[in-house]
Image: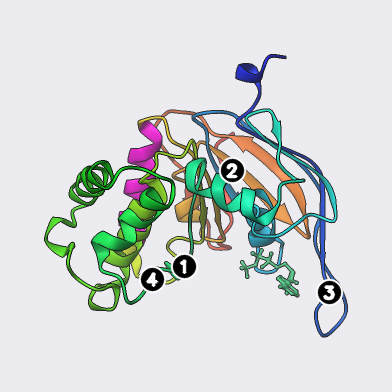
Amino acid sequence: MSESDAPLLRAEGLVKTHHGEGAPAHAVRGVDLRVRRGEFVAVTGPSGAGKSTLLHLLGGLQRPDEGSIRLDGERADGWSEARWAVERRRRIGIVFQFFNLVSDLSVADNVELPALLAGVPPKKARVARRELLAELGLEGKERSMPGELSGGEQQRVALARALVNHPPLLLADEPAGSLDSRGTREVMRLLSRFHQRGQTILLVTHDARLASAADRVISFFDGRIADDATLDAGPPPRRAGASGVLELRD
Ligand SMILES: Nc1ncnc2c1ncn2[C@@H]1O[C@H](COP(=O)(O)OP(=O)(O)OP(=O)(O)O)[C@@H](O)[C@H]1O
């Protein structure tokens, strides 16, 4: 297989155990996963299933105890912290539940920062920032500080920051987890829009409604993939049942 045929992301035999105060938590117990370019994959499952740990492993924020990760065919699990930091700027955008914006930088500076750190000339970084913020409906907010924005607006800034360097892969960890239903709808709409333009997305969420924006839904349970379903491209009846579990068409 040539590099260009390789999945954008490939994980094999991933294992991660957390050693905290109490008993060890076997968060990820052997996961094989391939994500092709252009896919929108949701990983869903109950609290404590290991979803965030999986996303952290795939983004290099935590190290697996076992297994391999390949990005664009290139082995990544042996990368140093510094290398992961560089690659996260260029190749992997990440959005988190609590936005993780730099509170004492303006909206504009938050979005430009990853571009400048990646060596993009300031003028180009400014253009990229303006385009993205306009696209996300935040033109008037460039000089605002994050604390002056609503949760939904902060998440849009975080999305702009994650995408400013046009990374091939976007990882999203409960991006609507601290938003109201309007903010959740907005995040769904934006993720769908970027996906329609070719953005590869891996979304981790316990929210079946959010997961239904994806074209492939992986059910994660007790550190393992319990189900991996590619959804039809047609119009939904995809909806959350009373149990909160996604009901798929036959
Ligand atoms: N840093 C850590 N130290 C110790 N245990 C951890 C750590 N991070 C996660 N865990 C444990 O690992 C297991 C999986 O946690 P994880 O956050 O990956 O699950 P999750 O499916 O994302 O849950 P949620 O939907 O509630 O965020 C849980 O038992 C959790 O308590």
The kind of residue tagged 3 is: His
* Label 3 CB sits under 8 Å from any ligand 1 atom: yes
The secondary element bearing badge 1 is classed as loop
Give the spatial CA distance, label 2 vs label 4.
32 Å
The kind of residue tagged 1 is: Gly
Mark 3 against mark 2, which lies toward the viewer? 3
Q: Which residue is mark 2?
A: 217
Q: What stretch of residues is rendered in magenta?
A: 184-196
- Of helix, strand and loop, which mostly describes the magenta segment? helix
Q: Which residue is mark 3?
A: 19
Residue 82 at what x, y percent from top left?
63, 54
In the figure, residue 131 lies in which quadrant? top left
Instruction: Classify 10 Å Cα crowding around label 2: few (below 14), some (14-19), many (20 and above).
Output: many
Which sits earlier in the primary sequence, circle 1 or circle 4? 4
- Residue farthest toward the bottom in the current orientation of the protein: 21
Residue 32 at what x, y percent from top left?
77, 40
Mark 2 against mark 1, which lies toward the viewer? 1
Mark 1 against mark 4, which lies toward the viewer? 4
Q: Which residue is mark 4?
A: 102
Q: Which residue is mark 1?
A: 177
Give the spatial CA distance, label 1 vs label 4.
19 Å
Task: Decide: is 4 above or below 35.
Answer: above
The secondary element bearing badge 3 is classed as loop
* Label 1 CB sits under 8 Å from any ligand 1 atom: no
